[in-house]
Amino acid sequence: MTIVTRFAPSPTGLLHIGGVRTALFSWLYARRHAGRFILRVEDTDRERSTDEAVQVILDGMQWLGLSHDEGPYYQTRRFDRYAEVLGQLLAQGKAYHCYCSKEELEAMRTLQLARKEKPRYDGRCRERRAPVPGVQPVVRFKNPLAGEVVVEDLVHGPVVFQNAELDDLIIARSDGTPTYNFCVVVDDSDMNITHVIRGDDHLNNTPRQINMLRAIGFTPPAYAHVAMILGPDGAKLSKRHGAVSVLHYREQGYLPEALLNYLVRLGWSHGDQEIFSLDELVQLFDIGDVNKAASAFNPEKLQWVNQQHMMRASLPYLAAILREQLQRLGVQTQDQALLEGIVAGQRERAKTMKEMAESSRYFFGADVEIDEKAARKHLGGEGVAVLERLRSGFAALTDWSAAGVHALLSDLAAQLGVGLGKVAQPLRVALTGTAVSPPIDATAALIGKERVLARLERALQWSAR
RNA sequence: GCUCCCUUCGUCUAGAGGCCUAGGACAUGGCCCUCUCAAGGCCAGUACACGGGUUCGAAUCCCGUAGGGAGCGCCA
């Protein structure tokens, strides 16, 4: 049997990391078993669904590389099909029209709550024969009255629900449009979904869906309900710390494979391994190994994971991302060698590609902005003499490479009888404007002789002012 | 209120009765390396929610309690 999973987000809010994680689990499970992965947009709530949210889902999935084999399907384009199944259920007496008014229903609920009962529809229209004039009825599914439904959940194990706890839910509104639970059931059945992997907020819906699935003659799929992601404070994820569009992470300079790696480790592990390539995940992931408990989102660890991936990624790949990030800062460049050189020098001192771009501005443009504090510390006093010696030394340097620069610096330090730091720091401030950069020999090599000499000159001017 | 779910370091997790005086990772502190900052290496502290059982033996099994979460919509 071919494994078929799906990711079925509703575009009523922007796709965030919680959704991404369930998408990832579904995708991984399908890939792991050489199955199919379907993308389905559950947009039946026309009031709250937005085109922007749909776009974020599409763009986000693409950025992350979570490719689908089918779809995207849109529920709003399948209304004819839902109407067809609805008609069948009605004809077979498995669903019925309910003429209760919202007021009537509301009264019923408050009464039940007052009696400390679980609010539920009492089925008063179940056996009604005659329509009520002037009332557009809703359609309710006739849920079994007795017995139990067992959800064989892949992460929770068997979960038992009593049918007596369930009521006859509305599957079509009075305007004829189908509701969520019904659409899901028809879709999962039509699309031959074998494994439903979703948030555990749906666990309570599952017995109803199983009953409906059986009513339309489909063997229910396997289910796996995964816990949600909490904010760093352990509370529900909010806009403050992560309930933002996934694309936000792209803007912030995170690598898609790093985000995925971080997310998969929330509730899943493989021994002591922390860093995984996507291929490894496809090999190792199993939905049955996922934890039951919710986990908190930890931005620091995400950063660490991101840097680990940066240190492992290829130079050309990172160079392309760095170029995009630089563009956001208004720096345009096509110099591939320079970009790769920067990546090589910066990737172990930046947590994100955005941070790398921000701390690499001195590789571009003619001048650098000199940081006052760093300049005061390194460009004054004995630094001046160092800078002057450097100026003449560099002017005469023919081997313009990191090794060549390094040789010059060590010689100078030896001549002056000081440590390398006494030479390197003034030079660093002169070249980068700051006291922090990749190794100064490599940095100087990347910046180039012409600009190095110009910046040395300018630093000397700063000292003399 | 009712139903369902969850509970190991601050955080992510390992752990499927003896290997656990509970392992790894992030974060934190210290040391080392070092031209800066990092990266890397080493070291340190901090956890089995609580209470009862079962057992020669429990983080692991059972039962309660507490705490947290979800659902109970003509929302998805």
Image (cartoon, coloured by chain):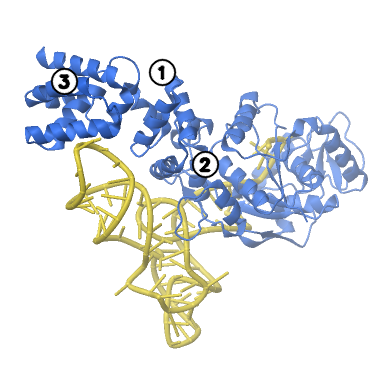
Chain colours: A blue, B yellow
Point out the frontmost of discs 1 and 2: 1
Left or right: residue A220 compared with residue B43: right
What is the number of callouts on the image? Answer: 3
The image's mark for residue A221 is none
Circles 2 and 3: CB distance less than 8 Å? no
x, y percent for residue A278: 56, 46
Q: Which residue is mark 2?
A: A257
| Residue contact between numbered discs 1 and 2, judged by CB atoms under 8 Å | no
Question: Sequence order check: which comes first, mark 1 or mark 3?
Answer: 1
Q: Mark 3: which secondary structure?
A: helix
Residue type at numbered disc 2: Glu
Q: Quadrant of the N terminus of chain A?
A: bottom right
Q: CA distance from mark 1 to mark 3?
A: 31 Å
The residue that disc 1 covers is: A331
Q: Do badges 1 and 2 share one subunit? A: yes
Residue B25: x, y in percent? 38, 53
Closer mark to the observer between disc 2 and disc 3: 3
Picture quadrant where residue A180 is located: top right
Q: Looking at the picture, which amino acid does disc 3 mark?
A: Ser
Local crowd at mark 2 within 10 Å, few (<14), some, or many (≥20)?
many
Q: Residues within 10 Å of mark 3 (few under 14, many from 20)?
A: few
For disc 1, the chain is A
Say which residue label 3 marks.
A392
Quadrant location of the C terminus of chain A?
Answer: top left
Identify residue type, mark 1: Val
